[in-house]
Amino acid sequence: MNKKLLILLLSFTFLFSLSCSNEKGEKKATATSEIKKGIKPVADDEIAVIEMQQPAYGTIKLELYSNIAPKMVARFKELAREGIYNGTTFHRIDQNLGIIQGGDPFSKDGNPQNDGQGNSDKPNLPAEFSDIQYDTGILGAARTQEPNSANAQFFITLKRQQAFDTRYTIFGKVIEGMSNVQTISGVQPLERERPLENVVIKSITIQPKQ
């Protein structure tokens, strides 16, 4: 099979599993989710710092965009301050599609079969879509087929991902440690999209921007 065609098919499969994949869902996303256009992201005075448990995976620092996605940023900060993310994993890694995904509280329970299915005990959030492009290092809110279902999980893009534009809430970007993100993305071997070896987030803290 042609390599480009294979990548396109894999991208479709990813969008089917993570996003509004059916016609009904797509219409709902368009009808209920206003897209913010022409608004330049402004970094908050606070950043998020991800410290990985394994020293080889290092530290990742993210700026956050409250002017683009105030609800998701507030939720991310709240969960980080409550320690909800501490001990979770990057349970989904896919170099072909260009993402690493984490933040699922279920990934702490020792049962790999439910990784990716969990949320916090807080209500889901409405979509906060914008026309910012999904380029390398973008921090996005993971969700189900329902557009207004962002909650706790997040993903970081490894490369430009045009298929995600205006479909997922963007709420930040990697400003330091992108090489560590790339290292994490190379973890092998994989069981489907889940690393056989847990890639554990030691902590996510909210700190003043230096």
Image (cartoon, rainbow, N blue to C red):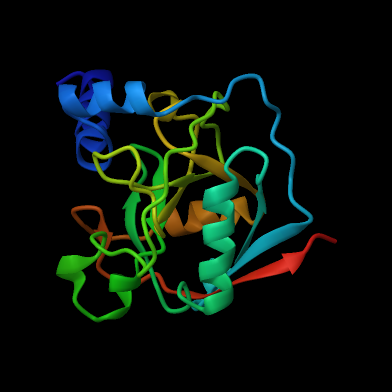
Location of residue 118 with respect to 1 vertically, above or below:
below
Residue drawn at (36%, 54%) of the image: 124
Who is closer to the viewer here, 11 or 169?
169
Q: Position of residue 39 (x, y in %)?
A: 67, 26
- Look at the image and tell me whether residue 200 can be seen: yes
Residue drawn at (48%, 42%) of the image: 158
Who is closer to the viewer here, 152 or 116?
152
Q: Position of residue 204 (x, y in %)?
A: 57, 70
Horizontal placement of 159 versus 117: left or right? Answer: right
Horizontal placement of 55 versus 45: left or right? Answer: left
- Look at the image and tell me whether residue 197 can be seen: no
The number of discs equals 0
Residue drawn at (25%, 68%) of the image: 196
Screen quadrant of the N terminus: top left
Horizontal placement of 65 versus 128: left or right? Answer: right
Screen quadrant of the C terminus: bottom right
Q: Position of residue 91 (x, y in %)?
A: 32, 62
**Which quarter of the picture shows residue 101?**
bottom left
Residue drawn at (37%, 59%) of the image: 123
**Which quarter of the picture shows residue 203?**
bottom right
Who is closer to the viewer here, 36 or 62?
36
The residue positioned farthest toward the right in the image shown:
210
Location of residue 196 with respect to 152 vertically, above or below:
below
Location of residue 55 with respect to 142 vertically, above or below:
below
